[in-house]
Image (spheres, rainbow, N blue to C red):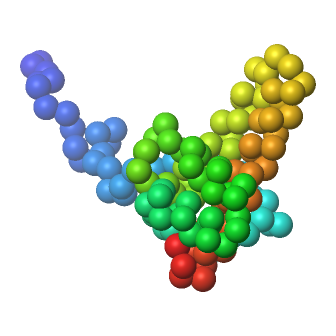
Amino acid sequence: MEMNVSRPVLAGGFWKKRTQPVKRAKDASLVRWESQPWRRQLRDPAEYEHPVARAALVQALLAEGLTMDADAARFAGTSEDRDCISIAQVLRFADSLVLRMALACTDDHVLQLVHLRRDAEDLAERMIEWANAGRL
């Protein structure tokens, strides 16, 4: 008896074609933010990754007198993109500060990182508020 092993069997067996597209896993920072009901939430989840010119955002924040948010916007997410910033970048930056706090050697360093994380979360809430109002 001769066995032909050159072609896999496609008739309803092990070798089925995938009919559904592979879903991309949601960013852990976004999942963490959306699981906190007391936080501001976006009406359109696609806005999380919408890039905004960093310089324009900093100018708008300074014009409103929000210097701490402007300072956070200057460097939050710069490792990903130096010219643009998105809400998702700010949330990922705030989450990365948790690891830095765990590795900090002095109380002063931890305190600085805690304030920086709070400022980044405030910036994210302000950006979400502006995105919901159509200003972002």
Badge count: 0
Q: Is 32 in front, or is 47?
A: 47
Q: Quadrant of residue 59?
A: bottom right
Q: Residue furthest bottom?
A: 133
* Residue sticking out furthest to the right: 107
Q: Residue at x 72, y 29 (%)?
A: 99
Residue 39, position as x, y percentages in the image: 77, 65
Judge left or right: residue 115 versus residue 133: right
Q: Is residue 62 left or right of residue 36?
A: left
Q: Is residue 116 left or right of residue 38?
A: left
**Which residue occupies 70% across, 64% down?**
66
Left or right: 12 in relation to 94: left
User: Which of the 4 image quadrants contains residue 106?
Assistant: top right
Q: Is residue 129 visible?
A: yes
- The residue closer to the viewer here, 28 or 89, is 89
The percent position of residue 15, horizontal first and vertical second, equals 29, 39
Instruction: Mark yes or no: residue 45 visible.
Output: no
Given residues 98 and 113, the one toward you in this image is 113
Q: Position of residue 118 (x, y in %)?
A: 78, 49
Residue shown at 21% from the left, 38% from the top = 9
Q: Is residue 92 above or below residue 33?
A: above
Quarter of the image that includes the N terminus: top left
Identify the residue at image location x=68%, y=44%. Answer: 94
Q: Nearer the viewer, residue 25 or 89?
A: 89
